[in-house]
Image (tube, grey):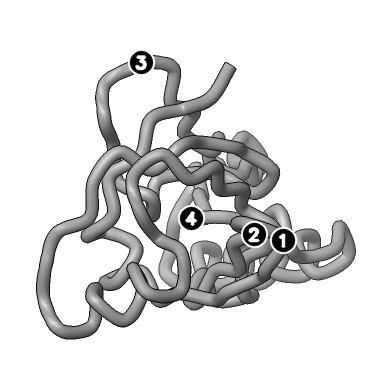
Amino acid sequence: MLHSVDDSFVGKSFQRRRACRAKLLLERCGATNTKMMKYTPLPTPTVTSNEPIELSSLSVGDAAVITSVIQDSTMRRLQALGFVPGTAIRVIRRAPLGDPTEYELRGTRISLRKNEARRIRIQLSA
């Protein structure tokens, strides 16, 4: 099977073209039984536990509460912008290549890269 990391941001025609190209490549390589192959995107992981997780693991539309922030010079600046424990945060959208991601907290929208979001621990809100 052919899999993709995240196809939530691309259209159906793009997905079909990519599947056709992959099928042609396999046929040229001598692969047999390509009719049985179907293009299916990977499901997006969902987080269901109440233990603290990384902010970067949330999906678009998910809401959470910040529990802790790992300290360094960059994170001190983010804390000044409102990334402090107890603050509600929501994922607004993610860039087409997955980085950066736009978050909303305290009425402000801020984009963070994955390496910055990994340093922020959150707990899902009910």
Would you place residue 101 above or below residue 104 in this image?
Answer: below
- The CA distance from mark 2 to mark 3 is 22 Å
Query: What amino acid type should be assigned to the residue bearing mark 4?
Result: Val
Would you place residue 27 above or below residue 111 in this image?
Answer: above
- The CA distance from mark 2 to mark 1 is 6 Å
**Mark 1 residue element:** loop
Measuring 63% from the left and 57% from the top, which residue is drawn there? 106
Query: What amino acid type should be assigned to the residue bearing mark 1?
Result: Gly
> Given contact means CB atoms under 8 Å apart, are the residues at marks 2 and 1 in contact?
yes
Mark 4: give few (<14), some (14-19) or many (20+) Cα within 10 Å.
few
Locate residue 16 relative to residue 54 in the image: left or right: right
Query: What amino acid type should be assigned to the residue bearing mark 2?
Result: Glu
- The CA distance from mark 3 to mark 1 is 26 Å
Query: What amino acid type should be assigned to the residue bearing mark 3?
Result: Ser
Among numbered discs 2 and 3, the one appearing first in the sequence = 3
Would you place residue 79 above or below residue 60 in this image?
Answer: below
Q: Position of residue 88 (x, y in %)?
A: 55, 42
Which residue carries the number 2 mark?
A: 104
Would you place residue 30 above or below residue 77 in this image?
Answer: above
> Given contact means CB atoms under 8 Å apart, are the residues at marks 3 and 1 in contact?
no
Q: Residue 73's quadrant in the figure?
A: bottom left
Which residue carries the number 4 mark?
A: 5
Which residue carries the number 3 mark?
A: 49
Along the line of sight, which residue is nearer the eye, 78 or 44? 78
